[in-house]
Amino acid sequence: MLYRKIPENGDELSILGFGCMRLPVKEGKIDEERAAQQVHYAIDHGVNYIDTAWPYHMGESEPFLGRALVGGYREKVKLATKLPSWTVKSREDMDRILNAQLEKLRTDHIDYYLVHGLVGTLWDKMEKLDVLEFLDRAREDGRIVNAGFSFHGSVDDFKRIVDAYPWIFCQIQYNFLDEKNQAGTEGLEYAASKGLGVIIMEPLRGGKLTNSIPPAVQNIWNEASVKRTPAEWALRWIWNHPEVTVVLSGMNEEAHIEENLRIADEAYPNSLTEAEIQLVKKVEQKYRELLKTGCTGCRYCAPCPSGVDIAGCFEIYDNFYLSGNEKEAKLMYAAKPGGIIRGDVPGYASQCVQCGQCVEKCPQHLDIPTFLKAVAEEFEGKDLRGWKVIAKKAFGKE
């Protein structure tokens, strides 16, 4: 495992961090036995940065980690969690939430504490509610060690937040499709120039850069003289930037953990050749021709008041345009948003009533209602009923 240093405190953090947003599930809940084994394995092989948050897995990620890190594992890692800024209505809420998180996580301190999911307007609200005084007080009394923030807004707002407080670190979305999106490369370099450690989220864009690779994209990867998986290309591209400290991976398959650990043993900064960098650029341009929604699957838009499975609808819609497999897409649309796999009520795109609540919550600032209308037009034709019958048979739900 390679490590990189946080400039302000000297912490040596593993370049691979374990993100607990997409843990393995069983019957709709975290598969605790399997997830704990995965977390332990990663720690045993050098990972020392574990990231979670108040809303992950509908509030169950923090309590899970509290149980998983007993037996000496808590002492081996730097633990990160986040203040859910969109829920905060008063200064008192901040203390209440942090204290609840300490209890859930079975710890007396959070090593890396973030103000979660900031955009410009949300930061303005939090500043008025005295979040900076809260961070100062929590650091003084030892409940948190290092203060940071995660971000999903414009680069201009990112810079003014960086300059507003003596942050130790920040967390941004970054991958080869997001060089100019949100904070982007400009924000990455700005934060690093100010001495902040930079934690990267969504390195694989919610799996879109590794799942159902379009033939046109795979053909480009095949041009490389050194053969790597799409995941390795994506991760190495990020780690090639010396400004990056940690890359979070929502690892929920044992094979993915093994692969990521192997890559994290070798991914030095500035190690890609110019030809390899240009190859990734070529892949990026091809993806831009194919992707439709830009959704990363973070599910911050959930729950929809009309019950729409927004992220599920968009995942299938994007995968359809990436793979061109219409039959698979229609089957999965009937099975996932249709509620067949979960044994739940349907969450079809057509249930959208254009209330706009999802738009306010979306870190990507997507026009979700418009995309949902397109999804409904694509998948909810006269043949949907037939695909539901097929899906029930395929998933043993008859």
Image: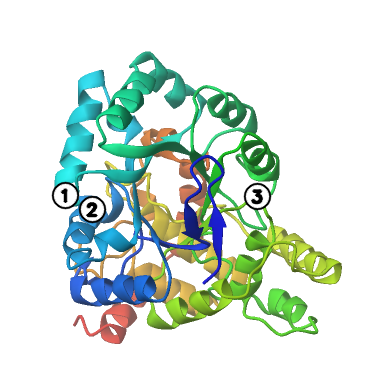
- Pointer 2: residues within 10 angstroms few (<14), some, or many (20+)? many
User: Which residue is depicted at the point 54% across and 65% down?
Assistant: 208
Numbered disc 3: secondary structure = loop
Mark 1 is on which residue type? Answer: Lys
**Residue wearing tag 1:** 104
Q: Is residue 226 above or below residue 86?
A: below
Give x and y (percent) for residue 176: 67, 58
Name the residue furthest top.
128
Numbered disc 1: secondary structure = helix
Q: Is residue 130 above or below residue 105?
A: above
Q: CA distance from mark 3 to mark 2?
A: 29 Å
**Residue wearing tag 3:** 243
Q: Nearer the viewer, residue 350 or 21?
A: 21
**Residue wearing tag 2:** 62
Could you say which quadrant of the image residue 87 lies in?
top left
Answer whether residue 341 is visible to the viewer in this image. Answer: no
